[in-house]
Image: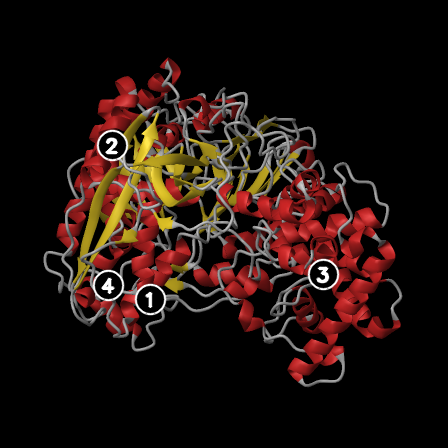
Amino acid sequence: MRRPVTALTTLAALAALGAGALLPAQASGSAAVAGDPYGHLWNILPPGSNGNVTAPDLVAVGPSREATGTTPSHFADQLEMYDALTKKAPAALTRGDLDSLYKANNFTPQQVVSTATPKAGVSIERDQFGVPYITGSTFADVEYGAGYAAIQDRMFLMDVLRHTGAARMVEFVGNTPGNVHMDQQQLQLAPYTHAEAAAQVQKAAARAGAAGPKFLAGADAFLAGINQAQSDLCPVVVASTCPVEYAALQKTPEPWDRADLTYVASLVGGIFGKGGGGEYANAMFLQKLVKKFGNAKARAVYNDLREKNDLDAPTTASNYTPYLVGGINPDRPGVAMPDLGAPTAPGSGAEIAGSSPLPVTSLPLAEQIGKAVSVALKAHGMSNAILIGGKHSGTGKPLTVFGPQTGYFTPQLLVEQVLKGPGIRARGVSFAGTNLVVQLGRGVDYAWSATSASSDNVDTVVERLCNVDGSAPTITSTAYKVGTKCKPMDQWTHTETSLPNIGSPGAPATYNFRVLRTKHGPVLMRTTVKGKPVALVTQRSTYGHEVDSVIGFAQLNDPGYVHDAASFQRAASHIDFTFNWFYVDNRDISYFGSGLLPKRASGVDPDLPRWGAASYDWNGWLSFAGHAHQTNPPSGYFVSWNNKQAPGFGGADNHWGYGSVYRSLALEDRLKAAIARGPVAIEDMVGVMSGAATADSRARYTLPWLLKVIGNDPKTRQARALLTTWLQHGTPRVDRDRDGAYADQAAIALFDTWWEDGQNSVAYDVIKGRLGLALTRQIPVILDDHPRQGIGSSFNDVAFYGYVNKDLRQLLGKHLRSPYHFGYCGGGSLAACRTTLRASLLGAVNRALAAQGVSSVSALTYDKTQDDIVSQTAGVVGARRIDWQNRPTFQQVVEFLTHRPR
């Protein structure tokens, strides 16, 4: 049963969807601030507000196909501002710098460059950055304007996203291996028929109670605005106002309907707003541990490495919030352990008879667009937030720098808008195509943002396979046991045909993909448990309900609903996706961890697959009180960089990185230092963020302990001195003067080689002392998250950073709140570990010297362009590379001084 919609929810939604807006004419407290009556706010969203490229734009850009700061208009005019931050030393930032590094985040344009009235009751003004200020006489008028302006800014991208959500990238963009894989993956995450997708909008409205009709009318108005704008921009695909990609792909824009809203929302719910689903990998690894160590020791090792509730982990909230407590226990009756090494059969998304083979022709445009979308839908781990209360600030009011990360690509996945009308007054960003409301931004006198929480709302359910004719099942069977009955799975064939075009030449290609689904969700794969055939099914709490969260977002947009920290938390609690939400006004800082989080049966282990029997199903949802949340913490600050939510709040089964090291420490350490120097100014907050954005967090929190254990080793003296100097500098990877090189490039080159060089890694050297090398490499976690990926986001959720840090501290006799059961490096012997690490560093030195052909570590160089942020291009025009910085893409800088009467 779904979480009920309370009377409070319904009344609030009514206010958000149709009541008169609360737009106070005067702030209480001190005098109104120039530019905004409530304070000083800035934001930035690179590369620019405009994401459409027309044929005239393409001619103006020229053969480079790379946007400039002025061409196309507003396409990349925020990129240079964004890149300029790393040219300035964090401690040297001034308040005046904020006006050149960000743009004003107000409700009134600084300059009105254009005004349009697409229909009576709707006005769209645009400022000098191309940001649309949408005013409507009614709520539906605002929604119409939001849809219209979104198409003006992201028409082709929105089309790509709705086709991605519908698993029709091959059909729309082109027949490439990457697009085929993306469609198959979407059919595993969120498979819907068109009728199901359309019905979800209607069902969400029904669940909203009395607010439902207003929501539905708003959604239909949003769609009407989209369709009118498409018609206006593209009466024919060769029109000078039509995005040029349509002509290149020989596609005609199709009208949007309700199903398309669900398809785009399914990307948010199925990719961004979830956590968990790693139970199968955990089961495989645990069984390998048992084979090596036996049951008892295997469980102890698993719990060490899993670090589900490590007391040494940095957390955002400080209050104890128990959820998913306890260690691994495969003996619980609801646990279903898939057989190690068993045969498998595919689940949803598998290609079946009737599909044509892939053509061998190169498909540059189709590949480029598909790659951009694929990267964009994965690069969401860099969102961060720092908030301090008034007791630490120079103004005596809270200060905040926060923002989400959705990757670097052109055009930007997020679209910025200002919405003003009855029951809605908000400025900020939303995922293009879901921008009926502002999802992250500011209200009248408050602001909010989010980071990915990845809380556990996904489980792997094991269904016993059967055949309806009573014959013996196999792993290819498509029926499953529901109680004592054998029930056929929901099954249909998803068919799409790709026709050749300029961007995707070759023969026509038709694909038939099978969709398999049980009552718990899409089938991931089929295998065996104790030799008996089973299906592994992905159960996600938001599957079939991705649209529901619009109610919570509408409340955040409504000045009549949100007026303080408590009302903010109530609104955030109505968002079913798993995010960490942050709030600031002129008095409070607040945090709420959202998500429709299941309460699990006592007979299951949340880390392992569970049987699909009714007795092991979810038992409702975590209450408001059970979620991680806090207002005005005793420390006087909040820090979030996708780290653990609160003490006792267990990490989802696929997140093993909540150990003693998380990159949030790079923010928290700098913030604490700023507070100690005090009082903190808003430019100091930006400096804290900027310093962390160019720091190698991996080296900062592992290198000191590696060097301590190695000690005074003559063979590595020069290397240790080099690394020590870099450590003293704060382990930066930054080229502030843009001379083409990092200042500490020799140390960086050496440490990168030491941490990961082919099959060599100092992290492996540490853990293999207990596990052995083969098993160490099979821990279901990544070894590193390096800047050289080109996506900006780095050093996120890497368990090995914590393993090295914690194990070495334990060997050195340091106090730990959650010590490991065993020592790992050197098998638990400090002397043996020292020998291992000395050999490991010397090996790295020799490999680095040989690779570069130099005789001294001080002569090592590092090509910093390896770290450059490469903007993936979801169209025909891209943006230039910029220097690496580990920073949100949309970012707000907030200093509220006054507030409406409370």
Disc 2 target residue: 201
| Residue type highlighted by circle 2 | Val
| Residue type highlighted by circle 3 | Asp
- Residue 411 visible in image: no
Judged from the image, the secondary structure of the residue bearing numbered disc 3 is helix
Foreground label between 2 and 3: 3
Q: Whole-Å distance between the Cαs marked 2 and 1?
A: 32 Å
Q: Earlier in the sequence, mark 3 or mark 1?
A: 1
What numbered label is drawn on residue 368? 1
Q: Position of residue 463 (x, y in %)?
A: 38, 34
Q: Position of residue 703 (x, y in %)?
A: 75, 59
Disc 4 target residue: 174
Q: Position of residue 850 (x, y in %)?
A: 68, 82
Judged from the image, the secondary structure of the residue bearing numbered disc 1 is helix
Q: How many marks?
A: 4
The answer to whether residue 250 is left or right of residue 849 is left
